[in-house]
Structure formats: structure tokens, C-alpha cells
Amino acid sequence: MPFDRRVKLVSHNVLISAICLLLSVSAGLEGASAAFGDRIVISGTEFRVGDNRIWINGANTPWHVWNEFGGQFDSGWWDNHLRQLHESGVNATRVWISCNGESGININSAGRVSGCTPAFWANLDNLFRIAQQRQVYIKATLLSFDHFADGHAHYMDWRRMLTNSANIDSLVTNYVVQFAVRYRDNPWLWSIDLCNEPDWIPETAKCGRISWDWVQTYVARAAAAIHANSSILVTVDVCMGPKYTARPPGRNVVSDAILHQRDHGNEGARLDYYSPHYYDWERVMRGNPFYQTPAAFGLETNKPIIIGECPALGTAGHTVAEDYAGACNNGWQGVMAWTSNGVDDNGSMADLALATRALRDKYPSLIFPDGADKTNDLPGSTRPGKF
């Protein structure tokens, strides 16, 4: 065979080998386990990134400035704070996107929502850019009972929104869906909390004692719309879990069956996980949740359950580090203490970090999954062969 032909043949074979190697590597990457920073999904009653379990070693950073999105948003503060969170072992934090609706969202006196301000979206774009850079997942709270409380100028506008079917649709179409669609491709938005502590709306005169029927209608329609337009997980942070998300039939006011009914049988009208709050004044209901399983605490356990708020100082007789460890060992899928930035007297970063750093150091691949399945020795797994 002529030399030049042998060279061409060898070159051809090398090229083919290189292509095969490249295809093999690409196939391996496609089949590899996802790592921290990919979208959080649900498997059974656990959270996962790809094949790897993730436990929400979380916090609440509800606001730096009240109603700051569309108001006085400070990107430098958020960048520094999310950096501190990540360095302290926090993998997710809960942020109130709207505190009481006094800025950012356009609502008229009849209760109709027409959209959000350009500044609102610009500030949120900045937040999610920072979250991606600092590697902290965001749980976004879209509303609070505060919207309907009589302590601000436009509370009646919000009450008119919630008690009118067409107005609820305007909120869902012009706020909830717009938010979900805008950020659905950013995996750092891991879930949406439709309303902070909505149980106070029917419970208290301050919030108008608006019936659960209307609250459920909003939750159902908003959840269905998010599920129809994205793969973002949906929840609602109820304050009194044992009272409103308990197991006995009819006691879980945000069950799949009730939410389906509120949206004409729409199967997308559902929550993906439960996120009750706990403070020591609630202990008379069913005790301290950190030292019992969600089932023993009386909750419906067909979905993952995290403790969405609790004091960052720890519960009565326990340190916050003991509370986080207790929740992890008892099958809760995460804890998000109130707060990382000391908005009241329930604690701050210095307190919270004692818990989040301890769990990160003990179970690093559970808190920051690195692409390898290392859950065999981790607590609370529901996978076959795990404890």
C-alpha cells in the first residue's frame, strides 16, 4: 500500500475513533446523575436532583426591605447575603416576592390585577441572577395574608380580588403565570409558595374572615396554571399544619381532592409538597414536630413535607442544631428557619448557621449533591434498602 494512502487511512481511522470517543463521552454525560444546581424534582416523598437525594437545609430571608421588588431593591445586599448563606451550608431560602401588595403589582380598586411594573421584573431578574451565581435555591412566596390585613392602604382591593372569580383569574393570568413563565427555565427557582400563612385569612377579623372556599379557589387555579406552564414545584405555607393539613378526611384543606374540586376537576390543581410552620405556641396541638415523624405529627404524608418556618433560635428546650438534626432523622425533607437576616426576635444568621453548617459537614452529599449517589448512609430515605 502506498505510504500516502496509509497516512490517509490512519488519519481516517483516528478521526473515526475520535468521533466515537466523543459520542461515548456525550452519552455518558447525558446518562450521568444530575448535580447541585440542576432542577429539584420529587421522587415519592423525597426531593432529588437527578438520581440524588437533596435535603432542604434552608432558611427564610423574607425581605431586606419590605415590598422591595418594584421598590427599594438592594442587589449588593442580596449578593452578599446569599453568599453568606451558601458558605453557611444553606442550600435554599424563602423570599417574599410581594409582602402586602403595596408595590410592584398593579391592582385597581375593583380588585382586578393587570400586571406588574417594569421595576418589579427588573429587580426579580437581578435576584435570580444572584441566586444562580451564589448557588442558593429560591422558594418564592407570591402573596401573604398581609395583603388582606387591614393595616395598609389598599387591603380592600386585595379582598375584592380574592372574593371574585374573575378577579382571581386576573391575578393568576397577569401575575402568577407571568412569574412562572419568566423564570421557568431557571432551576434556581425550585418552588413557588402561593401564599404565606393563608389560614389567617379565614381565621381573623383583621384579614376579613374570608372563607376557605375562596382561598382554596385561588390556590387551585394558581397551582393548575403553574403546572400547565412550567415544571416548577408548588406549595402553600400553612401556619397551623396539624389543624389544616392533618390526615383525617376533610381536615386537609389543601388536599388534592379539594383543590381538584375547586378548579372543576383539573388534576393540575394540586400541591407538590407540604410546608407547615411551627412555633412553640402551636405545641398544644400535637407537640414538637422536630422530634417525631410527620405521620406521628398527624399530617397527610403522601407528599414530601418540610418545616417551612420555625424559630432560628431553636424550639423550647432545644438548640436550633438539635431541631434540624431531629427533623432530618425523623423523615422531614427539610427545614427553613425564620430568619437568616434577623427581621424580628426569632434569630438570625449567627444562630441559624450553627444548624446548617453542622448538617452540611455531617452529610455533605445530602445538602450539596455532587452528581454521585451517596445516599446509602443518609437518614430518612424512602428508597428500598434504606432506613
Image (tube, grey):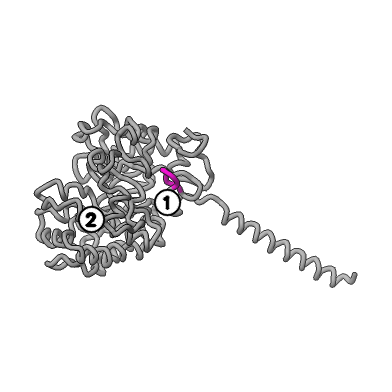
Q: Position of residue 372 (x, y in %)?
A: 54, 45
Amino acid at dot 1: Ile
Quadrant of the rendered image containing residue 9: bottom right
Q: Which residue in the protein does label 1 denote?
A: 40
Q: Position of residue 242 (x, y in %)?
A: 25, 38
Alpha carbon distance from label 2 to label 1:
22 Å
Q: Is residue 54 left or right of residue 353?
A: right
Residue found at x 29% / y 35%: 298
Residue found at x 20% / y 66%: 166
Name the residue nearer the viewer: 129 or 145: 145
Q: Is residue 153 above or below residue 53?
A: below
User: Which disc is residue 143 wearing?
Assistant: 2
Quadrant of the rendered image containing residue 305: top left
Can residue 244 be seen here? The reply is yes
Please provide the residue range marked out in magenta. Answer: 43-48
**For numbered disc 1, what is the local secondary structure?**
loop
Amino acid at dot 2: Leu
Residue found at x 68% / y 59%: 21
Name the residue nearer the viewer: 163 or 240: 163
Can residue 338 be seen here? The reply is no
Residue found at x 53% / y 43%: 373
Per the image, is 47 magenta? yes
Quadrant of the rendered image containing residue 382: top left
Q: Is residue 3 left or right of residue 175?
A: right
Majority SS type along the magenta span: strand
Point out the residue furthest to the top here: 317
User: Which disc is residue 196 wearing?
Assistant: none
